[in-house]
């Protein structure tokens, strides 16, 4: 067993970091990976934090020699918009879509990455066949156009097996416009991308999806805030794949899908593996590690043991 110390910890920026399962998982992962520390330092910020709050947190991470870097959840776009100028380098997707989910240090300089497309891709390939959309003619309906929703749309728009349509919803029309613009700036075809402002339950959009569609809750509802983007009366298309990005919280969306899992022949996926891939990718970046399939499997087993 690797001897751990507290001279090179990792930060975690979120809304309620003390409630995350990573608190139990990270020490186990530190042992698997031989990290220099099993310490995780939380930075809690409210949804819609101020520019000053974001800059204060980024400054604290940068100025603390005991922190190697940090993972950012919920506040990925806020950190980019408020404190992007504090980073010496941003990766392609961070610059393209305006979000930062991973903070690492190279000397005294901060490097920002947007890991969501990698996380989304690793997760999707685990539960979706390579020819799923060609076989079913299904759509992507992504409820929520924040960082995770943008990354999922980006990944599937670039996939050889692309959905028939990419339908994205959000309460904010500007966020939707930015998602479409991110795809355009990336050189992707947006002719089949539909952006819909959804002020209430999106049941009609779900009902309009063909069989075999992928329907995703990327709104954050059911995790930090209770609720669902759908009503309990929603009727799912048969053989749909329903993906709840959350793995903890009230999880209303997940419960709604499971209520019709058998009758509509749904494939229902929660956010646990998304959580595994999201954290492991950032840890690898922060501590400059290479993760192979076997190591990720060991991390998944260690996480499951303390879930």
Image (cartoon, rainbow, N blue to C red):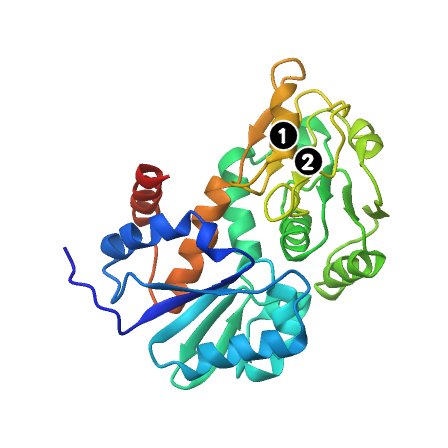
Is residue 76 placed above or below 197 in the rendered structure?
Answer: below
Q: Are marks 2 and 1 in contact (CB under 8 Å)?
A: yes
Kindly identify which numbered label has been placed on residue 241.
1
Along the polypeptide, which appears first: circle 2 or circle 1?
Answer: 2
> Residue at horizontal 50%, vertical 45%?
274
Is residue 10 placed above or below 256 in the rendered structure?
Answer: below
Query: Which residue is under mark 2?
Result: 215
Image x and y of residue 173, in percent: 84, 56
**Cα–Cα span, label 2 and label 1:** 6 Å
Is residue 107 placed above or below 38 in the rendered structure?
Answer: below
> Residue at horizontal 45%, vertical 84%?
109
Please tell me which residue lies in front, 154 or 46: 46
Please tell me which residue lies in front, 34 or 222: 222
The single residue placed furthest to the top in the displayed view is 263
> Residue at horizontal 63%, vertical 47%?
159
Image x and y of residue 14, in percent: 54, 60
């Amino acid at each position: 067993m690797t001897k751990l110390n507290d001279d090179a910890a990792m930060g975690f920026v979120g809304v309620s970091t003390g409630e995350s399962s990573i608190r139990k998982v990270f020490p186990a992962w530190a042992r698997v990976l031989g990290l220099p520390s099993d310490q995780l330092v939380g930075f809690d910020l409210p949804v819609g934090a101020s520019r000053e709050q974001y800059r204060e947190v980024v400054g604290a991470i940068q100025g603390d020699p005991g922190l190697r870097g940090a993972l950012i959840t919920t506040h990925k776009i806020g950190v980019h918009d408020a404190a992007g100028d504090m980073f010496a380098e941003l990766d392609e997707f961070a610059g393209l879509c305006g979000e930062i989910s991973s903070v690492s240090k190279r000397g005294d300089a901060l490097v920002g990455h947007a890991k969501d497309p990698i996380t989304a891709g690793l997760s999707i390939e685990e539960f979706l066949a390579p020819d799923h959309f060609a076989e079913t003619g299904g759509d992507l309906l992504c409820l929520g156009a924040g960082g995770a929703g943008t990354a999922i749309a980006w990944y599937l728009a670039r996939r050889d097996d692309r959905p028939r349509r990419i339908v994205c919803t959000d309460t904010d029309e500007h966020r939707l416009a930015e998602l479409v613009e991110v795809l355009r700036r990336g050189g992707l075809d947006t002719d089949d991308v539909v952006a819909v402002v959804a002020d209430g339950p999106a049941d009609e959009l779900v009902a309009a999806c063909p069989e075999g569609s992928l329907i995703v809750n990327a709104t954050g509802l059911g995790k930090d805030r209770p609720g669902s983007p759908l009503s309990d009366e929603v009727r799912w298309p048969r053989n749909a794949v329903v993906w709840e990005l959350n793995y903890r919280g009230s999880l209303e969306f997940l419960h709604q899908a499971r209520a019709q899992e058998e009758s509509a022949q749904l494939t229902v996926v929660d956010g646990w593996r998304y959580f595994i891939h999201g954290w492991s990718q950032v840890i690898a970046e922060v501590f400059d590690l290479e993760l192979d399939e076997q190591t990720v499997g060991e991390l998944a087993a260690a996480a499951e043991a303390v879930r």
